[in-house]
Image (cartoon, rainbow, N blue to C red):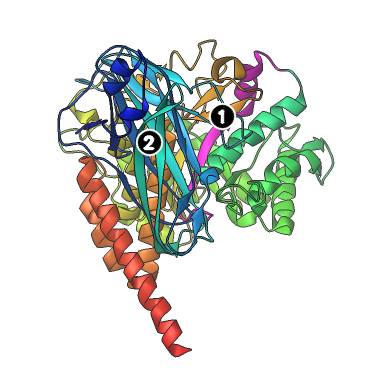
């Protein structure tokens, strides 16, 4: 429930005619799973401070909801200082990012019975992490009778010592302090890996990025630079991408052995596979992409030419040490009529090199079993929802995949417009599935990795992070695609004419932040399984997920499970540290 803290602290510092308006400003701390809409207010008991718990190498967010009931309040700003503990430890203010939550006007709800109106999603930083430039979202005018949320994100560096740290976010009006929101951060004694355990491959179209930011194709330098920036942003949110610039290595057609020029490709993709893409002073430095797609030109002169081209990829990736993450996106959602083509292409790939791992977005099917190494069914088709037996053409039991995994294959999954109904707001069947839509609950945006753990799924595919870019419609105004608000669009284009500053940057969505929260939840489960066994991790996962379409939607209960899991890991980590000290 949305709650508000009535501001009384330090009002004596505010003098002059503006004082009456400023006294009416209220502020409240809220958890990151709440979608704070501008027309909602509450008189419930206020939350006066941010009580945060996080591992090292983890982001932990919270929200501040501001509201004015007596006129507009101009010049509202927010800033944070360092977080400190009693032993001289410091988490620099550079690790705290404050965002202004902009709203998207939902004119057609994604789900039947959903709510129209303004929903928060684009996050414009006060100072961005990419170019370190101040943007124009702050200061702002807080309009009477409207709630304005701020998103505050704290990153805990890997070198941080466990313990309690304190600081504040100061809210000012025209330079005068009107509220100081205390932050109490408790750093647990365990560390999340920079490289994600749950594999991902989210689509990113560099050409669309360039068109949206520059209005047209300008040059290759812009294409590679913008694509790199968005790929870096995705990796900093624990997401690996496919597509990118979509430019395959140059090669000379003809001949028994393909000769590829890897220079441009390796410059683009290599740092993400080697763990050097994220700068040394940025969060999650050292993170590596968990997957990479085999880029294939649209046409070959002959079948032999295609085989030699694929063989060259396998050879190069083996030499670079990247081959464990390479996959061939063999076919997307094939119909039965496509199966022979899938088989022909898949057999050709295996003929080129038996180590090529082909991914197909299809449930397990014996007819395709010889050519599919990464089964990637729709989340809806992992288990049939009672009463809708015909939604999936095929929905084999999980036992079919278990057998495949035992033989060295992999099980991934994906979500699509089937989570809400692709042709507009759907009926009862579409309620309950995990969803990346703007007008879905925060838990619905965060739960996919929990489903992955529950069903022993190795990776997640998503078709696009910028599908609405380059479409001729401004993503800031319209991200309704395939019946869903935000379908395939997890970024907004951060152009200086829109957000201020001098450089173009990715603008992240609340949904992307919540996906990262879910990815970090998965790391908790993976660490717990490692130190205490799968059974204990499974018990926590079962508190969140019952079925792919039945999971904990209450934000307080959802976060309580994460809290209990963190406390368990912290206790186990502290016990191990104590045992090591005793042994010495």
Pick the front one: 264 or 278? 278
In the rendered image, residue 209, in percent from the top left (x then y), is placed at 61, 24
In the rendered image, residue 531, in percent from the top left (x then y), is placed at 38, 71
Disc 2 residue crowd, few under 14, some 14–19, many 20+, Cα 10 Å: some
Q: Is residue 215 magenta?
A: yes
Q: What's drawn in magenta, residue-wise? A: 194-217
Badge 1 element: strand
Question: Going 55% across and 20% down the picture, which residue do you hit?
Answer: 499
Badge 2 element: loop
Q: From the viewer's perspective, is 344 left or right of 24?
A: right
- Res 261 → quadrant: top right
Q: From the viewer's perspective, is 63 left or right of 162?
A: left
* Residue 46: mark: none
Figure check: 356 above or below 151: below
Q: Is residue 48 magenta?
A: no
Q: Earlier in the sequence, mark 2 or mark 1?
A: 2
Pick the front one: 505 or 87? 87
Task: Give the farthest residue toward the bottom.
Answer: 583
Q: From the viewer's perspective, is 31 left or right of 323?
A: left
Disc 1 residue crowd, few under 14, some 14–19, many 20+, Cα 10 Å: many
Which quarter of the rendered picture does the N terminus lie within?
top left
| Circle nearer the viewer, 2 or 1 | 1
- Res 86 → quadrant: bottom left
Question: Going 39% across and 26% down the picture, which residue do you hit?
Answer: 121
In the rendered image, residue 292, in percent from the top left (x then y), is placed at 60, 45
| Residue that label 1 marks | 506
Q: How far apart are marks 2 and 1 (CA)?
A: 23 Å
| Residue that label 2 marks | 415
In the rendered image, residue 320, in percent from the top left (x then y), is placed at 72, 56
Question: Going 53% across and 34% down the picture, which residue do you hit?
Answer: 203
Dot 2 and dot 1 residues touching (CB under 8 Å) = no
């Amino acid at each position: 429930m949305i709650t508000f803290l009535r501001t009384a602290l330090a009002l004596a510092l505010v003098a002059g005619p503006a004082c009456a308006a400023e006294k009416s400003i209220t502020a409240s701390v809220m958890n990151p799973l709440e979608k704070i809409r501008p027309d909602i207010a509450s008189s419930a008991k206020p939350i006066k401070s941010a009580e945060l718990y996080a591992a090292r190498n983890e982001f932990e967010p919270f929200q501040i909801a501001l509201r004015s009931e007596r006129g507009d309040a101009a010049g509202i700003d927010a800033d944070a200082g360092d977080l400190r503990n009693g032993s001289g430890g410091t988490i620099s203010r550079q690790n705290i990012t404050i965002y202004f939550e902009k709203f998207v006007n939902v004119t057609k709800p994604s789900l039947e019975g959903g709510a129209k109106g303004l929903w928060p999603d684009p996050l414009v930083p006060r100072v961005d992490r990419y170019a370190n430039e101040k943007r124009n979202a702050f200061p702002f005018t807080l309009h009477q009778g409207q709630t304005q949320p701020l998103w505050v994100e704290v990153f805990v560096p890997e070198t941080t010592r466990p313990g309690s740290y304190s600081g504040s976010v100061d809210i000012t009006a025209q330079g005068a302090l009107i509220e100081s929101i205390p932050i109490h951060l408790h750093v647990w004694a365990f560390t999340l890996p920079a490289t994600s355990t749950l594999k991902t491959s989210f689509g990113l179209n560099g050409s669309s990025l360039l068109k949206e930011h520059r209005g047209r194709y300008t040059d290759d330098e812009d294409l590679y630079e913008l694509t790199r920036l968005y790929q870096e942003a995705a990796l900093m949110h624990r997401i690996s991408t496919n597509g990118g610039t979509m430019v395959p290595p140059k090669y000379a057609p003809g001949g028994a052995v393909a000769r590829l020029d890897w220079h441009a490709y390796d410059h683009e993709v290599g740092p993400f596979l080697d763990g050097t893409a994220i700068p040394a002073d940025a969060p999650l430095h050292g993170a590596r992409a968990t997957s990479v797609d085999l880029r294939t030109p649209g046409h070959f002169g002959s079948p032999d030419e295609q085989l030699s081209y694929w063989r060259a990829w396998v050879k190069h990736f083996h030499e670079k040490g990247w081959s464990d993450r390479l996959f061939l996106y063999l076919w997307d959602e094939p119909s039965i009529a496509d199966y022979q083509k899938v088989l022909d292409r898949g057999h050709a790939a295996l003929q080129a090199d038996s180590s090529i791992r082909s991914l197909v977005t299809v449930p397990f099917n014996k007819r395709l079993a010889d050519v599919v190494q990464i089964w990637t069914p729709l989340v809806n088709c992992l288990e049939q929802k009672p009463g809708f037996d015909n939604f999936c053409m095929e929905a084999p039991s999980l036992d079919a995949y278990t057998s495949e995994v035992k033989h060295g294959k992999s099980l991934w999954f994906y979500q699509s417009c089937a989570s809400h109904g692709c042709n507009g707001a759907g009926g009862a069947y579409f309620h309950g599935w995990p969803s990346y839509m703007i007008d879905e609950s925060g838990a619905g945006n965060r739960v996919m990795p929990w489903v992955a753990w529950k069903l022993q799924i190795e990776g997640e595919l998503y078709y696009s992070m910028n599908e609405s870019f380059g479409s001729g419609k401004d993503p800031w105004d319209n991200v309704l695609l395939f019946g869903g608000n935000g379908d395939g669009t997890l970024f907004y284009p951060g152009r200086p004419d829109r957000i201020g500053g001098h450089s173009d940057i990715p603008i992240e969505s609340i949904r992307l932040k919540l996906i990262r929260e879910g990815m970090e939840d998965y790391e908790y489960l993976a660490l717990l399984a490692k130190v205490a066994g799968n059974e204990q991790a499974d018990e926590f996962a079962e508190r969140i997920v019952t079925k792919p379409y039945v999971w904990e939607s209450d934000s307080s209960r959802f976060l309580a499970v994460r809290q209990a899991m963190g406390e368990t890991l912290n206790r186990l980590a502290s016990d191990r540290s104590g045992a090591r000290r005793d042994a010495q």
